[in-house]
Image (cartoon, helix red, strand yellow):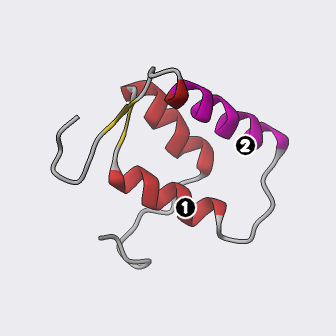
Amino acid sequence: MLDRESSPNLSLTQIVERIFRFRQITPIDLVLLNRVVLSGNSLSSQEHDLIRQLQDDLLQGKIWVADESGQL
């Protein structure tokens, strides 16, 4: 698991764009997304739109969800 010192300091936009690019979300992506969203900083309207688009793509099956074992 990632700790705060070893995890990259990525923006929500960078994380979501990587997920869209590879059409897959990994456990590490989930940790990074949670860290950014729950950081207490306000999200911009653009970031809210990205999260909505990510949710829509997940619900429509456009993005694969990788589990801890690396299986899709």
| Image coordinates for residue 3, horizontal then vertical, percent | 37, 77
Which residue is drawn at the image coordinates 60% and 35% (left, top)?
55
Please check the rendered image and state whether residue 51 is part of the magenta-colored stretch, yes or no. yes
Q: Which residue is mark 1?
A: 34
Position of 1 compared to 70: left or right? Answer: right
Number of the label disc, if any, that sits on residue 47: 2
Which residue is drawn at the image coordinates 65% and 29% (left, top)?
53
The vertical placement of 40 against 69, above or below, is: below
The vertical placement of 9 against 20, above or below, is: below
| Image coordinates for residue 20, horizontal then vertical, percent | 48, 28
| Image coordinates for residue 43, horizontal then vertical, percent | 78, 53
Foreground: disc 2 or disc 1: 1
Question: In the image shown, does 11 or 33 lie closer to the viewer?
Answer: 33
SS category of the residue bearing label 2: helix
Number of the label disc, if any, that sits on residue 46: none
The vertical placement of 30 against 14, above or below, is: below
Residues packed near mark 1 inside 10 Å, few (<14), some (14 to 19) or many (20 plus): few
Position of 43 compared to 9: left or right? Answer: right
**Distance from label 2 to label 1 (Cα)?**
13 Å
Residue type, label 2: Glu
Which residue is drawn at the image coordinates 60% and 49% (left, top)?
12
- Give residue 31's quadrant in the image: bottom left
Q: In this figure, what is the number of numbered marks?
A: 2
Residue type, label 1: Asn
- Give residue 71's quadrant in the image: top left
Which residue is drawn at the image coordinates 65% and 67% (left, top)?
38
Quadrant in which the N terminus is drawn: bottom left
Residue stretch in magenta: 45-57
Residues packed near mark 2 inside 10 Å, few (<14), some (14 to 19) or many (20 plus): some
